[in-house]
């Protein structure tokens, strides 16, 4: 009997690990962590329970790793979008950058949309125990707050932060609600036409002129 070479074993192990992460991502996007079972993930991945234990320790470990990877992917995309702005972006330009990762996911569907749906389910705060992502959250908040303050100098910092959180919450709701299917069926340009003014409106707020 010929023993499998170490490199081949590592490659096979990596493929099993990746397939488990992909299966977990799909199911978490559909139902969230409370609605996913270990058997469902292993069946979809074509793996066994021992593979989960070996690579992740437990179902929770697998789900935590999947969510953390999805969240980091989203944060990196949003950081890149905000970094692409000029020194004094308008509210519309800021709203487009803020919503760009979500709009791209709606247009792409598949894995990209699954990533966004998984992120939306954990909300907009860093999950407890994932301190390594805190810096990325803070960078996004700082960049968004600075751009908002330049356009809305009469609005306090706390209120601007609240508006940014409202805008993020609206994007999370959109990707999880039934309207997500309606948006995904529209051309990318139409999604942008509909979504960017709504996000810009959340940033701008309303003040009674009376």
Image (cartoon, rainbow, N blue to C red):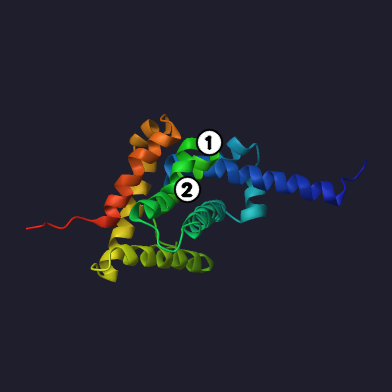
In the rendered image, residue 116, in percent from the top left (x then y), is placed at: 46, 46
Question: Quarter of the image holding residue 117?
Answer: top left
Q: In the picture, which quadrant includes the C terminus?
A: bottom left
Packing grade of label 1 (10 A; few <14, some 14-19, many >=20) is few
Secondary element at tag 2: helix
The residue that appears at 33% across and 58% down in the rendered structure is 165
Q: Is residue 76 left or right of residue 138?
A: right
In the rendered image, residue 52, in percent from the top left (x then y), is placed at: 62, 49
From mark 2 to mark 1, how far is it between C-alphas?
A: 14 Å
The residue that appears at 49% across and 42% down in the rendered structure is 114
In the rendered image, residue 24, in percent from the top left (x then y), is placed at: 55, 44
- Report the residue that reaches farthest toward the right: 1
Q: Nearer the viewer, mark 2 or mark 1?
A: 2
Q: Which residue is mark 1?
A: 110
Whether residue 129 can be seen here: no
Relative to 125, does residue 35 appear above or below in the rendering? above
> Is 146 in front, or is 163?
146
In the rendered image, residue 53, in percent from the top left (x then y), is placed at: 63, 52
The residue that appears at 29% across and 64% down in the rendered structure is 160
Secondary element at tag 1: helix
**Residue 101: numbered disc:** 2
Q: Earlier in the sequence, mark 2 or mark 1?
A: 2
Whether residue 114 can be seen here: yes
Packing grade of label 2 (10 A; few <14, some 14-19, many >=20) is many
- Report the residue that reaches farthest toward the left: 210
Question: Quarter of the image holding residue 142?
Answer: bottom left
Q: In the picture, which quadrant includes the N terminus?
A: top right
> Is 22 in front, or is 201?
201
Q: Is residue 62 left or right of residue 105?
A: right
**Residue 153: numbered disc:** none
């Amino acid at each position: 009997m010929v023993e499998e070479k170490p490199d081949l074993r590592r490659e096979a192990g990596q493929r099993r690990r990746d397939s488990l992460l992909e299966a977990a991502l799909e199911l978490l996007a559909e139902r969230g962590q409370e609605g996913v079972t270990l058997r469902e993930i292993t069946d979809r991945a074509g793996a066994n329970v021992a593979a989960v234990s070996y690579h992740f320790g437990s179902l929770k470990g697998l789900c935590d790793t999947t969510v953390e990877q999805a969240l980091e992917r989203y944060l990196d995309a949003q950081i890149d979008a905000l970094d692409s702005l000029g020194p004094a972006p308008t509210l519309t330009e800021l709203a487009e950058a803020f919503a760009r990762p979500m709009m791209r996911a709606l247009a792409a569907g598949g894995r990209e949309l699954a990533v966004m749906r998984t992120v939306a389910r954990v909300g907009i705060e860093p999950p407890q125990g994932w301190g390594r992502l805190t810096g990325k959250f803070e960078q996004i908040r700082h960049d968004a707050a600075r751009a908002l303050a330049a356009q809305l100098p009469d609005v306090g910092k706390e209120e601007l932060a609240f508006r940014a959180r409202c805008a993020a919450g609206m994007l999370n709701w959109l990707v999880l609600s039934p309207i997500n299917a309606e948006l995904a069926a529209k051309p990318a340009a139409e999604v942008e036409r509909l979504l960017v003014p709504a996000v810009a409106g959340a940033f701008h707020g309303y003040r009674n002129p009376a």
